[in-house]
Image: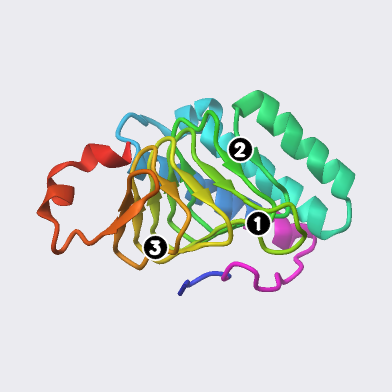
Amino acid sequence: MTSTSQAPGEARRVRTGPARARNLITLAKEDLTTARKQDPAARTSAEVALLYPGVHAVWAYRLAHRLWARGHKFTARAVSQTARGLTGIEIHPAAVLGRRLFIDHGMGVVIGETAEVGDDVVIYHGVTLGGVSTRPGKRHPTIGNGVQIGAGAKVLGPVTVEDNAKIGANAVLVKNLPAEHVGVGVPARVRDPRTDPELMMDPTIYI
């Protein structure tokens, strides 16, 4: 998975004081721009900042993730659980999320502890990035850049969804999904939109 920003799992450079604050402000502005780009119903940045639970969940995650990385694990979990109660979205503070993530509607989204999500990903409501094992270690999905995950989809286990792939609504993905392919069904079948024109004619499979 290629990225212009930090790749999932890559060590983060610690920022302090004003530099950290500027970074958070920059990311927050980027989130507002992303929401307005991805959602035609978003009219103003103020509306997004005040009323979009998906944006609020990402902001809370960033705080919780920083606390987690600094060893304040109980406080990090407290922040994430408070955000879960307020937004209906649960993101473990140890997960690694890229930039410009947009969670649309958001209710019921769950992102597990060892999940890794790239840049420019869109996740609809009811999505689970979950595990299938109770053993320690990598047990949640790795999501590439530019991936779109439809409403109600479940991506389970340490599978990899490569760049610009799409997962249809209510699909259950338990195998790797190649770049620019589509996963639909239960269990999800891999389909190539370049040879399967039906996928290009029915964009509602992602919503």
Residue 134 got which mark?
none
> Viewer-nearest of labels 1 and 2?
2
Residue 105 in the image: above or below residue 94: above
Q: Which residues are magenta?
A: 7-23
Alpha carbons under labels 1 and 2: distance apart: 20 Å
Is residue 190 one of those drawn in magenta? no
Amino acid at the residue labelled 1: Arg
- Dot 3: what SS? loop
Label 3 belongs to which residue? 177
Q: In percent of the image, x 65 and y 69: which residue is there?
A: 9
Q: Nearer the viewer, residue 86 or 158?
A: 158
Q: Is residue 111 left or right of residue 145?
A: right
Q: In percent of the image, x 47 and y 72: which residue is there?
A: 3
Upstream in the sequence, badge 1 or badge 2?
A: 1
Label 1 belongs to which residue? 22
Alpha carbons under labels 3 and 2: distance apart: 26 Å
- Dot 1: what SS? helix
Label 2 belongs to which residue? 57
- Residue 19: quadrant of the picture: bottom right
